[in-house]
Image (tube, helix red, strand yellow):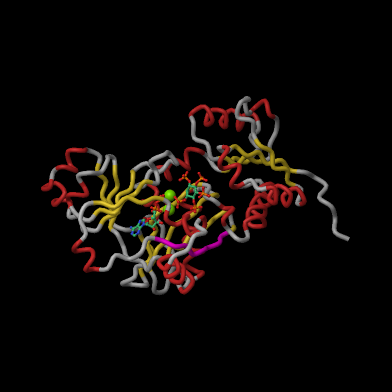
Amino acid sequence: MSKPESHRYCVGYALEPKKVHSVILESLVDHANQRGIDLIQIDRTRSLIEQGRFDCIIHKLYSEDWKKQLDEFSSTYPEAVIIDRPQLIERLHNRVSMLEVVNQISIPLENDTVGSPKQWVIKESKTLDDANAIEELGLIFPLIAKPLEANGGPNSHNLCLVFDQSGIKKLSIPVVLQEFVNHGGVIFKIYVAGQHITCVKRKSLPDIPEEKQKTMTGKLPFSRVSSLAVRNDSHNEEDDTAQNNVEKAEMPPDSLIEGLAKSLKEAMGLNLFNVDLIRDASDPTRYLVIDVNYFPGYAKLPNYVPFFTNFLWDIVHSKTA
Ligand SMILES: O=P(O)(O)O[C@@H]1[C@@H](OP(=O)(O)O)[C@H](OP(=O)(O)O)[C@H](O)[C@H](OP(=O)(O)O)[C@H]1OP(=O)(O)O
Ligand SMILES: Nc1ncnc2c1ncn2[C@@H]1O[C@H](COP(=O)(O)OP(=O)(O)O)[C@@H](O)[C@H]1O
Ligand SMILES: [Mg+2]
Ligand SMILES: [Mg+2]
């Protein structure tokens, strides 16, 4: 006869209402409950310390007040585990620092390489207007322009393709200009929750054929491409071809997925994140990390409930993050 869980653990969560709705599903709460873990919503209108003892807190809030409350909570309950420390999450709120770490790690691989696309940061609007300055930077079109800040703000996901200098002029600063890499319209999303790692394929931006690269001008805005395939129910021929590309695409080797996830986890000191990875269509041994997100949409994973519960179980039982 299996022994019932005698001790109950309490995990508090502090998330924006939209995130609570998308990630704290009833099925997760029930499953965790059966494994001895009570998932309790932290009341953001009351002080954290008044809400008693939590074995662990998971969160995706960044206000100064929240950071202060977490510090105060940690001093009162030093044995509680905070997933994750705000100071460590900050690196992911800037599209330069989030990729710097990729180039600091080394993953033992046989043939493949993992890096990040070339990128340039522009912080002054006069640089955008100065054709000479842009030429001196040695940019190679097409480029992908991303807001420097990636903190979940309204603008964070407003990206655009830039085909020439006339497109650069219309951008807003501060902006990151990144080499656009054809990658067969497929992105690999590696989800990490502590020691648990899983990788899924999603639809991505389609390749831009060379002849088109020469004729396109200006800029083309887009947003949230990789979640479209998950959200979109309508179909057309283009969607079908894109979906077909996703289905046909070979996954990266397991050793690469695990090596990258574990090295990044160690280097960043974070438990909850995902990595957007592409494979260069003209060199399939060249993998590039293009984005790292804190506490992403885990509920989109097919095995989300056991995946996330196993992570919480590990934390409350080992007390280490
Ligand atoms: O809302 P979801 O479920 O699409 O999750 C978003 C993530 O989607 P993904 O799991 O990578 O497909 C999304 O990932 P991408 O940047 O789209 O790759 C972000 O993590 C986003 O958070 P934020 O707006 O950057 O703070 C995540 O949004 P929040 O739910 O945290 O606001
Ligand atoms: N360097 C790149 N080359 C080609 N496509 C890219 C590149 N960077 C981003 N993309 C495409 O743009 C999408 C969004 O970019 P990403 O950096 O992941 O921003 P976000 O934080 O909004 O998800 C990716 O899912 C991918 O389809
Ligand atoms: Mg992304
Ligand atoms: Mg992102």
> Which residue: 34% across, 49% down?
159
Left or right of 272, for residue 24: right
Q: What residue span does the magenta drawing correspond to?
A: 197-204
Residue 23: horizontal and vertical position, in percent? 60, 47
Query: Which quadrant holds the N terminus?
Result: bottom right
Residue 281: horizontal and vertical position, in percent? 34, 70
Q: Is residue 3 placed above or below 90 in the rendered structure?
A: below
Q: Is residue 198 magenta?
A: yes
Residue 131: horizontal and vertical position, in percent? 12, 47
Of residues 205 and 293, the one drawn nearer to the viewer in this rendering:
205
Residue 90 occupies which quadrant of the picture? top left
> Which residue: 21% across, 38% down?
125
For the image, the number of numbered tags is 0
Q: Is residue 309 magenta?
A: no
In the picture as drawn, the residue positioned furthest to the left comes out as 132
Of residues 116 and 134, the one drawn nearer to the viewer in this rendering:
134
Of residues 220 and 107, the one drawn nearer to the viewer in this rendering:
220
Left or right of 76, for residue 146: left
> Which residue: 38% across, 43% down?
94
The secondary structure making up most of the magenta span is strand
Q: Is residue 117 placed above or below 87 in the rendered structure?
A: below
In the picture as drawn, the residue positioned furthest to the right comes out as 1
Residue 173: horizontal and vertical position, in percent? 27, 39
Q: Quadrant of ligand 2?
A: bottom left
Residue 57 occupies which quadrant of the picture? top right
